[in-house]
Amino acid sequence: MNLIVKAYEVSNGTYGYPRVKAYILREYGWRINHKCIYRLMKQMNLQAKIR
C-alpha cells in the first residue's frame, strides 16, 4: 500500500490505477494485478485528477 501512495504522490495525484501499476512495475519490478491496485486505491480514497 505504501508503494501505491508513493506513486500517487510522485505524480501529484494525476495517476490512476493503470499508471500506478506501470510505475510500480517500472521502478520496483513488481507485478501487481490492476484489480488489486484499483481496490486499494478506492479504499484509501485516492482518485486521479481529471483534466
Image: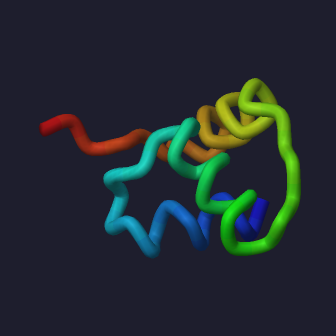
Residue 30: x percent and y percent? 87, 59
Q: Residue 41 appears at what percent x and percent y?
A: 62, 41
Q: In this view, does 23 lie to the left or right of 15?
A: right
Which of the 4 image quarters holds residue 1? Answer: bottom right
Rendered residue at 32%/52% (across/down): 14
Q: What residue lies at 72% left-to-right and 39% top-to-bottom?
A: 37
Q: How many marks?
A: 0
Which picture quadrant has residue 33?
top right
Applied colour scheme: rainbow
Q: Is 7 located above or below residue 14 in the figure?
A: below
Above or below — where is 10 with respect to 16?
A: below
On the picture, is 50 further left or further right than 20?
left
The picture quadrant where one finds residue 40 is top right
Where residue 15 sits: x, y (%)?
42, 50
Q: Which residue is drawn at 21% across and 36% down?
A: 50
Locate residue 28 relative to residue 50 in the image: left or right. right
Residue at x 56%, y 38% (from the top left corner): 17
Foreground pick, 13 / 29: 29
- Residue 22 falls left or right of residue 12: right
Q: Nearer the viewer, residue 41 or 11?
A: 11
Task: Pick the quarter of the image with the C terminus.
Answer: top left
* Residue sitting farthest toward the left: 51
